[in-house]
């Protein structure tokens, strides 16, 4: 592991220890520090660090950055108006439906830069950064975390904390040691991203191919994306859905390379895909054990990822704000936190992961995709659901139908989200 940034001493104690300085942890640290708490933000990596991601920001993620007080970061960045959807010989351009409520536009920022910016913002608000330092376990007394064991350069230290926010990403090693379990019976994702030079890096639309094929021409239950970064490059990636019953066994590198060749002319790519990296994605709240008496899991650690597109930066920022609110409420997080996550996301996640599960059945994708891509109304609904632009306040027919589907699915599920 890389050594920590010089001058970052490991403290003995703090009010709030945030483990993981991705968008979730850094946003939580910024908000708690701004309220006057003593906050330690700890990460195993030294920043700036890379994170395997599509780098796409939905209008909801952009709104989250605005609320955080980071609107400046978006100056001069791509202003993405919606999605260009392709498949089965047809294309549809769909502006983000209802996005005006979230500021109106999406964007894209490479994670090396985005995450470092939020982290620095948190430090500017008063959080103490401790990088190059890994959390390896916790000491609990009566269900409360007394201290967290961390290691740096082979040496172990204890940090005592009144509260702990666990934001250590998909694998969530600390979450696991506290009892977090990932349930793979509902849909999860496998995804790979890459970067390519493009003459269309300033394009105002994100590209999305719903008909995703492997190099042999086999149809995959997933989609391909091209997200313009506005800096001469685009993020090109593929994501596929899987369940325990139908695991995704494909090698993603040849698929992303094949996909890049396929979009090369359209996106005027001037380099082959580089820095290919892939990751698994627990989604739709498919985890249990997300909180204890004085600790909460947020962001990817709590599987807060949209099951239909693998997007989670907006949830990371939102769950950070919700967790900081809960710190102030001094309730027992063990029951209050999963209940709040369910109230906020439960029905939408239940409906989306059921729909995602259906898409892993081989015949479903062409049966829905071929006519679907030709229907402007249906594609607008797809973008609304994929862009996470339906909120609990929406009362139109689609929003009500989606919520009803979620409620029915939740009631039928053996294990509703976050349980
Ligand atoms: C291929 C791919 C494409 C994606 N594309 C998009 C997209 O376009 N848009 C979108 O919104 N979302 C996308 N996502 C999802 C998005 O990347 C995540 O939802 C987001 O990163 C969640 O943020 P987080 O802060 O919860 O976790 P992370 O960003 O993963 O941050 C976790 C942090 O915890 C640290 N950490 C881990 N373990 C420890 C430990 N033991 N001790 C200390 N620190 C630790 C890590 O170093 C890391 O910095 C994609 C995901 C993948 C895999």
Image (cartoon, rainbow, N blue to C red):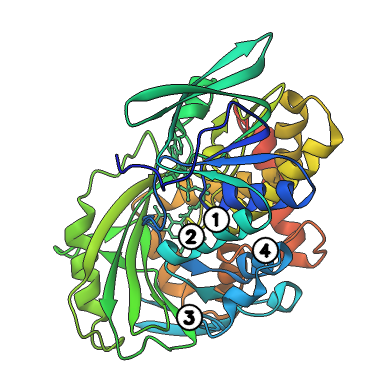
Residue 142 occupies which quadrant of the picture?
Answer: top right
Q: Nearer the viewer, mark 3 or mark 4?
A: 4
**Answer yes or no: do the residues labelled 4 and 2 have beta carbons within 8 Å?**
no
State the residue at coordinates (42%, 54%): 47
Q: CA distance from mark 3 to mark 2?
A: 41 Å
State the residue at coordinates (33%, 65%): 237
Which comes before the other along the chain, label 4 or label 1? 4
Q: CA distance from mark 4 to mark 1?
A: 15 Å
| Residue placed most toward the observer, 315 or 190 | 315
| Residue placed most toward the observer, 176 or 95 | 176
For label 1, the crowd category at 10 Å Cα-Cα, with few meaning under 14, some 14 to 19 and many 20 or more, is: many
Q: Is residue 390 visible?
A: no
Which comes before the other along the chain, label 3 or label 2? 2
Which comes before the other along the chain, label 4 or label 2? 4
Q: Is residue 297 above or below residue 387?
A: above
Q: CA distance from mark 3 to mark 4?
A: 32 Å
Q: Is residue 93 above or below residue 48?
A: below
For label 4, the crowd category at 10 Å Cα-Cα, with few meaning under 14, some 14 to 19 and many 20 or more, is: many
Q: Residue beneath label 3, please?
A: 374
Q: Residue beneath label 4, please?
A: 64
Q: Residue furthest left?
A: 216
Q: Is residue 145 above or below residue 53?
A: above
| Residue placed most toward the observer, 338 or 90 | 338
SS class, disc 3: loop
Q: Nearer the viewer, mark 1 or mark 3?
A: 1
* Quadrant into which the C terminus falls: top right
Q: CA distance from mark 1 to mark 3?
A: 43 Å
Q: Residue furthest front?
A: 7
**Answer yes or no: do the residues labelled 3 and 4 have beta carbons within 8 Å?**
no
SS class, disc 1: helix
Q: Residue beneath label 1, please?
A: 119
């Amino acid at each position: 592991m890389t050594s920590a940034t010089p001058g970052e001493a490991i403290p003995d104690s703090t009010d709030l220890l945030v483990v993981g300085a991705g968008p979730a942890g850094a946003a939580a640290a910024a908000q708690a520090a701004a309220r006057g708490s003593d906050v330690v933000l700890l990460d195993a990596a030294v920043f700036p660090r890379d994170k395997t991601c599509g780098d796409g920001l939905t209008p909801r993620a952009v709104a989250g950055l605005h609320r955080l007080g980071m609107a400046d970061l978006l100056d001069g960045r791509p202003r993405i108006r919606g999605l260009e959807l392709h498949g089965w010989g047809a294309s549809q351009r769909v502006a983000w439906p209802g996005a005006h409520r979230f500021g109106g536009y999406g964007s894209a920022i490479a994670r090396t830069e985005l995450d470092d910016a939020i982290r620095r913002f948190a430090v500017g608000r008063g959080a103490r950064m401790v990088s190059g330092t890994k959390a390896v376990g916790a000491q609990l007394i009566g269900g409360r975390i007394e201290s967290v064991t961390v290691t740096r350069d082979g040496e172990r230290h204890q940090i005592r904390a009144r509260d702990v926010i666990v934001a250590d990403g998909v694998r969530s090693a600390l979450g696991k040691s506290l009892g977090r379990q990932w349930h793979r019976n509902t849909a999860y994702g496998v995804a790979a991203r890459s970067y390519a030079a493009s003459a269309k890096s300033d394009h105002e639309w994100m590209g999305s191919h719903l008909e995703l094929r492997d190099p042999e021409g086999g149809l995959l239950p997933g989609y391909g994306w091209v997200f313009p970064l506005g800096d001469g490059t685009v993020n090109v990636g593929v994501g596929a859905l899987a369940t325990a019953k139908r695991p995704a066994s494909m090698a993603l590198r040849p698929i992303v390379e094949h996909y890049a060749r396929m979009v090369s002319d359209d996106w005027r790519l001037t380099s082959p895909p580089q820095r290919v990296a892939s990751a698994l994605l627990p989604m739709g709240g498919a985890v249990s054990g997300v909180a204890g008496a004085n600790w909460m899991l947020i962001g990817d650690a709590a599987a807060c990822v949209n099951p239909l597109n693998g997007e989670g930066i907006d949830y990371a920022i939102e769950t950070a704000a919700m967790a900081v609110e809960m710190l102030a409420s001094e309730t027992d997080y063990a029951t209050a936190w999963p209940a709040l996550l369910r109230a906020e996301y439960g029905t939408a996640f239940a409906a989306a992961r059921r729909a995602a599960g259906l898409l892993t059945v081989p015949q479903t994708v062409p049966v829905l995709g071929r006519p679907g891509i030709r229907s402007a109304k249906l594609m607008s609904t797809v973008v609304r659901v994929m862009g996470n632009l339906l909120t609990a306040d929406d009362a139109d027919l689609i929003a009500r139908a989606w919520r009803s589907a979620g409620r029915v699915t939740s009631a039928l599920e053996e294990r509703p989200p976050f349980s």
